[in-house]
Amino acid sequence: MNKRSAPSPLKGEGWGGGEKPVDRPLLEIHGLQVAYSGIHAVKGVDFHVAPGELVALIGSNGAGKTTTLKTLAGLLSPASGQVIFDGKNLAKAAAHQRVAMGMALVPEGRGVFARLSVAENLLMGAYCRSNQTEISDDLARMYDLFPRLVERRDQLAGTLSGGEQQMLAMARALMSRPRLLMLDEPSMGLAPLMVKKIFATIQDVAAQGMSILLVEQNARLALQVAARGYVMEGGAITLSGESSDLLGSDAVQRAYLGG
Amino acid sequence: MKNFKFSKRGLLFFLMFVAVLALPFITDALLGRGWVRIVDFAMLYIMLALGLNIVVGYAGLLDLGYIAFFAVGAYCYALTGSPHLALAFPQLFPDGVHLSFWIVLPMAAMLAGGMGVLLGAPTLRLRGDYLAIVTLGFGEIIRIFMNNLNAPVNLTNGPQGISRIDPVRIAGVSLNTTQSVFGITLPSVHLYFYLFLGFAALVAFVSHRLEKSRIGRAWMAIREDEIAASAMGINTRNLKLLAFAMGAMFGGVSGTLFAGFQGFVSPESFSLMESVMVLCMVVLGGMGHIYGVILGGLMLALLPEMLRHSVVPLQQAMFGKVIIDPESLRMLLFGIALIVVMLYRPAGLWPSPVRRRELASDEAAERV
């Protein structure tokens, strides 16, 4: 598994996802098809995420990545296919139940609660949990992981910069103590320096053993941090493999990496 | 030092409490009995505004048909606390139905809450202006039902409305009579004032507890971003329905009180204009802020009456006759007031600290 010994503000406690033996994938998707308002956006995709693995789902705009992720989070319902999380079929699980089961989504465009303070946003992330001491421990861990949020603790989330909002959205998702973190376009609309910071944090979190599904348009960046990648095109997965292979592949080079 | 501060605050609250208790007597002495009645109505409006504040202010669901729940509560007690049903079912109820107010009240609250869910369920996927139009239609449907349910069976007596509704009784004592307690004479309007004050305080207290609760936080998350809210594990469907139900229940309670107080209900009390008025109380006062909503309710219930009582004498003194009808002047001034408040205090007259912070930080963001 991943380098658990890496120094990090998370104090090596891990996220729970990495503790399990790798006998079966944490998330399995079989033949997933999604259609909404007449658009057949996802046309039968299969992929999996193993415990503690960082997997990238890359592809251009409109390839069906976000639709796939929204379906995994329960915000859209599939036309057919199966989503299996931790051995359980999620067909009947509503979005809010999936959070309790350990899936956390950082939505596209971040979706912070603009008129709630940073601290209130983080506490909303722990909505499904009840143990107050654990919640305040995790809150402290989030402030360690994202020091920028400490200064802005009492500020309204809507007044943060785009990068700070992305950090907040990630921290808020982690507050639910997920076993799978799903990130939708974390680099969207951010300055290059901020993107770098965000991706370093993603790597940090992954190094703690968190399983991550990363959806990105920025293929190079995503494949640099991910162990494996899937390339999505026109609602189907056209290519998959180790990140290094994908980075070297001619098809990916031509289509996404500009040369 | 801290103790001193606390007692100062406590003293302030005590003085306010005494002032509110003395309000009907002060009003009676200064302005006359008719004004005590107006203050009673203001209390009912405050309850309505607080109820709507749950739906609009906390959960962010724009409801333009809120008065329908007030109507449901009012008709509930009108039917079960008056001789009226004797007309429709002479064999079954020769004297009409005369249930105790205190039995009808929880029933009406439940029924109104049920109606709230009924309105909420089909509109779960709607937001903003689309939701506003559906709720507006719902409010009108209820009013038109009340207007037309006098045939084939005379259930609501149509536009004539239902009269001779039983007064509210507490321990057998009718609030429609003058009572004296410890040598203080309490006319009927005073008694109703204290009853309404108690209910308004209860509604405000429940609102406050809801606001600070897990449910309240979930409502606010839904208001801010529904997709993100469900990604937090919030059951958005149930919580939206709960917001509709809670708001509707408060509306139903105040409608029941209204029927008992007024002794008469008719569909014209539940027009679209009433829904708009209650919404304005919430928006003008300060959406999502209990004190602000109470202020909005008080102002919009009292100011039109003040205008009514001052415009006619003023015009007569100045021109010797009434040139502008106070009713049309009321709408004109009301419109101007709305525009001015929305331009200069967009978060309402008394916004919640968070909203104030937001406006302040907007300005700060502009400076950067």
Image (cartoon, rainbow, N blue to C red):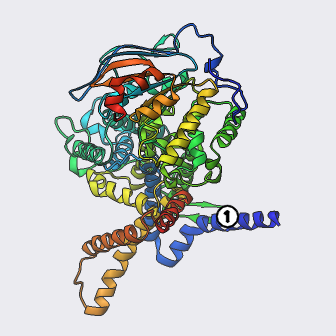
Q: Quadrant of residue A235?
A: top left
Residue A67 visible, this orientation: no
Residue found at the far left of this picture: B152
Residue drawn 50% across and 66% down? B368
Q: Amino acid at mark 1?
A: Phe
Q: Secondary structure at mark 1?
A: helix
The image quadrant of residue A234 is top left
| Other-residue count near label 1 (Cα within 10 Å), few / some / many at <14 / 14–19 / ≥20 | few
- Residue at image position (53%, 56%) is B290
Given residues B287 and A118, the one toward you in this image is A118
* Placement of the N terminus of chain B among the 4 image quadrants: bottom right
In the drawing, does residue A209 fall left or right of residue A224? right
Chain at tag 1: B
x and y percentages locating residue A195 in the rendered image: 49, 43
The location of residue A83, given as percent across then percent down, is 42, 15
B333 lies above or below A18: below
B260 vs A110, nearest the viewer: A110
Q: Which residue is mark 1?
A: B13
> Does residue B335 appear left or right of residue B19 in this picture?
left
Quick one: B139 or A25, which is closer to the camera?
A: A25
Residue B219 spot, x, y in % from top left? 48, 42
Q: Tell me if residue B227 comes above or below residue B368 in the rendering.
A: above
Depicted B71 relative to depicted A67: above or below: below
- Residue B365 place in picture, x, y as percent: 49, 63
Q: Residue at x 62, y 49 (%)?
A: A148
